Image (spheres, coloured by chain):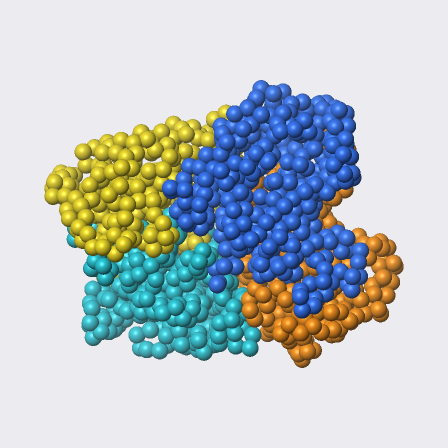
Chain colours: A cyan, B yellow, C blue, D orange
Amino acid sequence: MNTFGRNFRITTFGESHGSALGVVIDGCPAGMELSAGDIQPALDRRRPGTSFLTSGRAEKDVIGILSGVFEGRTTGAPVAMIINNEDVRSEDYEALRDVYRPGHADFTYHAKYGIRDHRGGGRSSGRETVARVAAGAVAMKILQGRGIAIRGRILEVHGKTTQEEIEKEILTAKEAGDSVGGIAEIVATGCPAGLGDPVFGKLDAAIAGAMMGIGAVKGVEIGDGFFAAKKFGSENNDQMTKDGFLSNHAGGILGGVSTGQDIVVRIAVKPTPSIAKAQKTRDVHGNVVDISVKGRHDPCIVPRIVPVAEAMLALVLADSLFEQEKYR
Amino acid sequence: MNTFGRNFRITTFGESHGSALGVVIDGCPAGMELSAGDIQPALDRRRPGTSFLTSGRAEKDVIGILSGVFEGRTTGAPVAMIINNEDVRSEDYEALRDVYRPGHADFTYHAKYGIRDHRGGGRSSGRETVARVAAGAVAMKILQGRGIAIRGRILEVHGKTTQEEIEKEILTAKEAGDSVGGIAEIVATGCPAGLGDPVFGKLDAAIAGAMMGIGAVKGVEIGDGFFAAKKFGSENNDQMTKDGFLSNHAGGILGGVSTGQDIVVRIAVKPTPSIAKAQKTRDVHGNVVDISVKGRHDPCIVPRIVPVAEAMLALVLADSLFEQEKYR
Amino acid sequence: MNTFGRNFRITTFGESHGSALGVVIDGCPAGMELSAGDIQPALDRRRPGTSFLTSGRAEKDVIGILSGVFEGRTTGAPVAMIINNEDVRSEDYEALRDVYRPGHADFTYHAKYGIRDHRGGGRSSGRETVARVAAGAVAMKILQGRGIAIRGRILEVHGKTTQEEIEKEILTAKEAGDSVGGIAEIVATGCPAGLGDPVFGKLDAAIAGAMMGIGAVKGVEIGDGFFAAKKFGSENNDQMTKDGFLSNHAGGILGGVSTGQDIVVRIAVKPTPSIAKAQKTRDVHGNVVDISVKGRHDPCIVPRIVPVAEAMLALVLADSLFEQEKYR
Amino acid sequence: MNTFGRNFRITTFGESHGSALGVVIDGCPAGMELSAGDIQPALDRRRPGTSFLTSGRAEKDVIGILSGVFEGRTTGAPVAMIINNEDVRSEDYEALRDVYRPGHADFTYHAKYGIRDHRGGGRSSGRETVARVAAGAVAMKILQGRGIAIRGRILEVHGKTTQEEIEKEILTAKEAGDSVGGIAEIVATGCPAGLGDPVFGKLDAAIAGAMMGIGAVKGVEIGDGFFAAKKFGSENNDQMTKDGFLSNHAGGILGGVSTGQDIVVRIAVKPTPSIAKAQKTRDVHGNVVDISVKGRHDPCIVPRIVPVAEAMLALVLADSLFEQEKYR
């Protein structure tokens, strides 16, 4: 299933080492100004090779709009966008052709499909998210037009919370041939009350599915999340006065529908599975081997997941907005 | 959106104080033995009034199968099931007609729909889950036929972990006119490798959406979840030997696809929002009022959410199974 | 697949000789006045036993609304409706348990599902349409609120076009133990321009699918339909002046999108397959038998298909309206 | 809505005079051999400029596979394919920028979207079908692997049935600055019994929707179609003996499910609306104008619709096959 959304639908395609990645947006309103300039900055934030802390793969990630835009405006036709792969070094992966890298989708894709594009993880690569970010940028533009903003940040990496500690932690892991995970928070401000579609299209359910569907994400919480489990009802309820809510423990969502407050989402990101440290694994023939994953990998994927999580939240909100506006 | 699933689809209906709740299952295989006896035990586990720790509402929750079964076997036609509401005391809620109960969907439903069935929360009530549990029982039977079992348990309530502490904690809260939250874990054993549909139908994404869509759930994690954020990659990766994986930090899912190991899910449940303790809120006219929610409420909803979470996991797995079997 | 529509979604259930039939409407706008009185008249038009020309099965088809309506208004929750089967004579069908009736779904359902509810055709019975008509009545009410009306009529039966000829033709067939088919036309007036969703949700495509999905319908045409195949472009094009179109050969749809003119649909209905005349067929064991289908059957199904076709057109238009209004 | 199908899903994009058209196939089985060579012949059959009877637009329609294929086999990842537009003469259409061509989607797209890509009809152009044919070729390969073949042919053009008459008729129309319509028949052989999904995913309903969704198609019939309306039941029913059916008036579908016989579909195609003959129309400003549509147009579109209709039937059947195989 490579389509996401019901009203603002995106369909993505492409692999890490294929010729191109792309996305088709279906359900984008007509008459909206749209150009590559609206999308490129989001891709630039996500792309690798921009810091010593991230992968050295040097992709320019230049977006091309193939359809759906005429004389600078959307026409209601599907907006197809493409990003060509340029810095592909498939030979780096030749040694991994038959080996299941621990923590990756190698084993499961093989179990599922009986065939596997081993080059950089193929479709299961984080590179796939470039298409989501491109689509998310279009969603973001729609949200901005309604006064909604989305902003993500790193809360902690390997338990550390300051920028200095975090950078040090990542470097230490990198030098040890290891990697670290962390937690990020994504907040949407300016959302109207009323978004979300009970009982199986609840806003928090949609957000949780969207976030957990990002590779490396292993946990999602809304508002106080897991901490709510340790509280009394009298502490956790958000009381109201005539000016609105007195607190936002709920993270902006009650009964699966937005309250008009900030929507607050946190995600747990696992440490990058590709590490140089030797690990035990097996190959497709059943042989046990020691593996040391070389190549160009991020020692911590949290910084690069932030723009992806922002994009996914934008996609969920745009979709919910159109669902809600349907009945106005 | 009251439909859940793509291949094994359920559509639910009904409100807390309406005449009946029900579910239509579409995509149930033909030729399967099915009777009320397969479903009633699951409803009995979920239903209230069974302990001093839960709501006193005395619903028998007798299931009726309206269609889709002929001479004891499914025919491929949709299986509709109905549960009549019997112990309805709408008058209990008359005082709440215009008041937004804190922590409930009252305000958001009103914002969304402009109208609200105030009787027991209407459609936003936990009572709605009776239909999910009925459908889940059918899914469970399908899974059992393939050797898959699902088992949930309470991990902690208000930070306490033993049965004795938990009961004491709930009683203390109840006596104080308050409520408590907790954490539950749901595990599926016997799942084959290969379930889940990249990149937007990943198994963990589907599970996260299903769990977060249960009222009162504020966090979801798979495998080590948020704890993974604090680890090194070398600790978190599940290494393999020829006999399989050496650990299951991933919770049985890699790249959104099942590994064949146990699928491990944890959910954070907030404290029941209906409490007797006075709280500030407002009514639909903008007046600020003090509210003390009386009536028959669970001081802790975690025990009753366990069978619902099991049902949702069963529904996700049945759906994934049929998706996967499609291409065999 | 027992769900129809994307925005105004209906899910139906029930069989000819089961305990009840019903429908769940999901996506009905909140705040709309709705009662059984809005739906019953449509059921009464469709139901059998009203004339010597139709089946003698005496069903009252009393509609019950189970959910989604509170104090006379829809709440945004799913509207479930139920019709109990009362005049069930399953024993009439005992002789047909193992025999495939010619022209019916008996053979194909058995081939598909490996099991078959032989009582009156089970799920494949025309009785299933009672649920569609109930849902269609709700759609119709929505359309009426926007000035859209739908009206169907019989164009011809067995090649005859006047009321007198048609009645005579049906009676003659009935007396001969035979049946006759015919053609009906359904017209929607008052539709705004702009309905329909290129390229795979075109209005004419949705209508064609909806009509062909009615049992016994074997052909669908829009506007001039098959006659357009015999014309020059200069005859078939609808020219425009400043007051609008000069003709409506297109039947109110161009490029899959409504023009604002009348939407004109015609359907070909085959003769009822249940006839008393002896026919060759086989049973599930492969034995060839002569069959004479007794029981209470319509010698011509066209009159009873008209309200069903009206309902399906209403469902398509309501769905298209919400799709279009989404972006306003 | 630019996605078609539930199990074998295609999403198309692109306009007549944009930079490229394309399609993403989602749900294509993994491990299947696939290359451009499987698709190009179908595009060559559809493409213009191959005969004096068709449009002079000289597109080579070279297919490029962007994703989903690795070392010659599908991987389960989405298969994206692209066709660049080369022979684009947008200037031909400059005079039509503000004018609604009769019989085209110009007026309705403008009404729907408030903006219009006037170049060759933009998204409403028949050129959009190149993407359907590419996807259809993949579906066809899947069907062939199961012994199913699809073959279309022209039955008549402007009422004429022989090849000689038809060519003459088209030429005469062309010389008169006019166009003609016709009827085509598409037959699928080798289909197993059991395809189609009651009650809203019936095979005939899916086919009717698919066919009517092809531009210029105004009528669809299955089996005897409209002729069935003129028959007695005793003539129309397909009787059975132990070797199977004695006739195929039903066109291979009963109760919306395939019988195992040939599936027979006929479509009515209207005359090409682009004609040189002067016609009355209006422009976006409300001015009435005389229009003579010049440029490179097919005087009869029937021959070029045949491969498109074959492709759509292949897509429906592949989708139905996977739906049915899900439960095996």
Above or below, comparing residue C206 to residue A71 in the picture: above
Q: Relative to A44, say whether C180 is above or below.
A: above
Identify which residue is drawn at 33% across, 73% down: A54
Task: Write the residue at 78% across / 64% down.
Answer: C234
Residue A15 vs residue A321, the one in the foreground: A321
Left or right: D229 in relation to B117: right
The vertical placement of A58 against D174, above or below, is below
Residue D33: x percent and y percent?
Answer: 59, 57
Q: Is residue D285 left or right of residue A267?
A: right
Q: Please say if C235 is above or below D184.
A: below
C196 to the left or right of A156? right
Report the front residue among B279 and B305.
B279
Q: Residue at x 43, y 28 (%)?
A: B35
Q: Position of residue B167 (x, y in %)?
A: 15, 39
The residue under the point 68% across, 24% down is C293
**Figure quadrant of residue A306:** bottom left
